[in-house]
Image: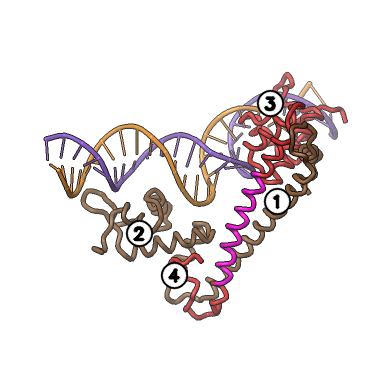
Chain colours: A brown, B red, C purple, D orange
DNA sequence: CTTGACCTTCCCATGATGGCAAGCTTCATC
DNA sequence: GATGAAGCTTGCCATCATGGGAAGGTCAAG
């Protein structure tokens, strides 16, 4: 409302913890916030907007390094949308790679689990397979 | 062959880096290795077998903490296979959760990317959406 | 003027891994 | 036997994103 917020309010409005806001500032992802005379950080509506941008990007799995690039593209009114698009495509590829890795693990484990009685008996094909070194 | 290996040989045979073998020992995942008079670690075929167990488990996405449990089940001849089975099921559930999270991110990003021209023009619905805070 | 909620900085921890440096050992080759 | 390379030792630091906590300053309401 007033357009000037303490870090706690900025945190509530953006969904980024105060801890992380300070951290982002410390590593240079965000510019240094203005301070009151007593040293409290002050955030404008625009600053909160930026924080929400960061939050959304994190929720989509971008690294802070990538978010730094996204932010500078966002701020640069003369950007080429191609650059943004390329960044996103690269991230999608990485996500797909991770998904496939995890699916491979899951499928292997499911196969293993199917062979195991899962009762009070000690015989366990899961352990046998782990010991054999067959991760497929 | 001889059945006694230096850490480098154990590393080659197991696929676990020497660095990690030392680390696993330091955190108590593996027992302290025997040493030669000059302090070199010595590994038996059995030790290498254990290392391969750890490697396979890591490749399947188990945390070191979970691997510790798996190892103690492996060593305990009176285990109930149920305990192993439960551990694996839990891990499969976690993998499924991660997969769904990543798929959600990927699908959101794909949608966003489709709306973006990806050329030299600055207009970019991707950035707009990131700024709006719509991670869906 | 006290109290409680908020803010500040600083240090440490996570989990799994890698890198590097200084120094010692082992072994093959000259 | 000396030398050099390869391999071993420990120890410290870095990554990535985040959280926890302590010690101390500030602000507003009662």
* A29 vs B76: above or below: below
Name the magenta segment's main secondary structure: helix
Image coordinates of residue A96 in percent, x first then y, are: 65, 62
Q: Are marks 2 and 3 on the same chain?
A: no
The residue indicated by pointer 4 is A74
* Pair 1/4: label in front: 1
Q: Quadrant of the N terminus of chain B?
A: top right
Question: Do the residues at discs 4 and 2 belong to one chain?
Answer: yes
Per the rendering, the mark at residue A13 is: 2
Marks 2 and 1 on same chain:
yes
Name the spot of residue A46 as percent of width and height, x first. Answer: 33, 66
Q: Is residue B93 left or right of residue A84?
A: right
Question: Disc 4 or disc 2, which is closer to the eye?
Answer: 2
Q: Please tell me if label 3 and label 1 are on a single chain.
A: no
Magenta stretch bounds: B90-111
B105 magenta-colored:
yes
Q: Secondary structure at mark 2?
A: helix
Q: Position of residue C23 (x, y in %)?
A: 62, 27
């Amino acid at each position: 409302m007033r357009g000037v917020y303490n870090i706690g309010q900025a945190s509530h409005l953006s969904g980024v913890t105060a801890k992380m806001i300070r951290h982002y500032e410390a590593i240079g992802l965000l510019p240094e916030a203005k301070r009151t005379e007593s040293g409290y950080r002050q955030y404008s509506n625009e600053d909160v907007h930026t924080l929400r941008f960061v939050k959304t990007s994190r929720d989509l799995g971008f690294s802070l390094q990538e978010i730094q690039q996204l932010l500078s593209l966002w701020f640069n009114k003369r950007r080429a949308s191609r650059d943004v698009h390329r960044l996103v495509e690269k991230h999608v590829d990485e996500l797909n790679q991770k998904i496939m890795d995890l699916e491979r693990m899951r499928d292997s484990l499911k196969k293993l689990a199917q062979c195991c009685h899962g009762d009070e008996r000690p015989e366990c094909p899961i352990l046998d397979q782990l010991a054999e070194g067959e991760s497929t």
